[in-house]
Image (cartoon, grey):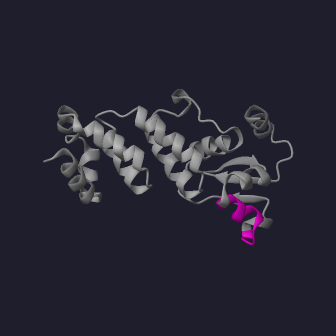
Amino acid sequence: MGAHLGRLLDSGDGSDVSFVVDGETFPAHRAVLAARSPVFKAQLLGSMAEAAMPSITLRDDIAAATFKIMLRFMYTDALPGDEELGDSPTEMLHDLLAKADLYALERLKILCARKLRDGLAVDTVAATLATAEMFNCPELKKKCFAFFAEEENLKKAELTDDFVELRKKFPSILDELNEKMGA
């Protein structure tokens, strides 16, 4: 079914709403979006002003590339491969997870968290931990802590700019990390 809906999205046949994001227009189908997201359901079928609008400009700090992937996910229930996630797949996954949280797309949020978990590295773990904390992803947070538990990983990660940001924005999470590591 995902392939069929993906073709429907690609063709634009029967679309009844379009989204303008960063100057790019994306035709869509209200029923599909409403079925996947309670936020879109309220926006497109409820009493919000957007319900009657044929074109909606999104200003939710969302990039066109992120919206395109999120929209395709709502139709196909699949994430693209890393090569389709742009120059920085990890950053795209962080952004997608944040937007999945914003639009109440739980399955997308879970899949993004899983891909982030599977791709943890010294240079990404601090930003991933911050994302896990901000968007309530306990399994991802647990995996980040386990990654830090390896002493060399923590020492190397502490040298990254993202770790400095993590320390500034979430000092309590570092206390929790130290407690778990017995330091």
| Residue at image coords 30%, 36% | 123
Look at the image and tell me in which quarter the N terminus lies: top right
The x and y percentages for residue 107 are 58, 45
Left/right placement of residue 64 relative to residue 45 reads left
Is residue 27 positioned above or below 123 on the image? below
Q: Residue furthest left?
A: 183
Q: Residue 151 in the image: x percent, y percent? A: 17, 35
Q: Does residue 95 show up? A: yes
Residue at the far right in the pictured view: 14
Magenta includes 40?
Answer: yes
Residue 62 visible to an observer of this rendering: no
Identify the residue at image location x=40%, y=50%: 138
- Residue 65, position as x, y percentages in the image: 58, 42
Q: Residue at x 19, y 40 (%)?
A: 159
- Horizontal side of 165 relative to 11 (left or right) equals left
Q: For this rendering, which residue is in front, 16 or 183?
A: 183
Q: Is residue 71 above or below residue 81?
A: below
Please tell me in which quadrant of the rendered image residue 152 appears: top left
Q: Nearer the viewer, residue 53 or 140?
A: 140
Q: Is 118 a magenta residue?
A: no
Identify the magenta region.
39-49
Which quadrant would residue 72 be assigned to in this image? top right
Q: How many marks?
A: 0
Where, by quadrant of the figure, is residue 91 drawn? Answer: top left
Image position, residue 63 (x, y; %): 55, 48
User: Magenta stretch mostly in which secondary structure?
Assistant: helix
Q: Residue at x 42, y 32 (%)?
A: 118
Q: Is residue 135 above or below residue 66?
A: below
In the depicted structure, whether residue 35 falls above or below residue 112: below
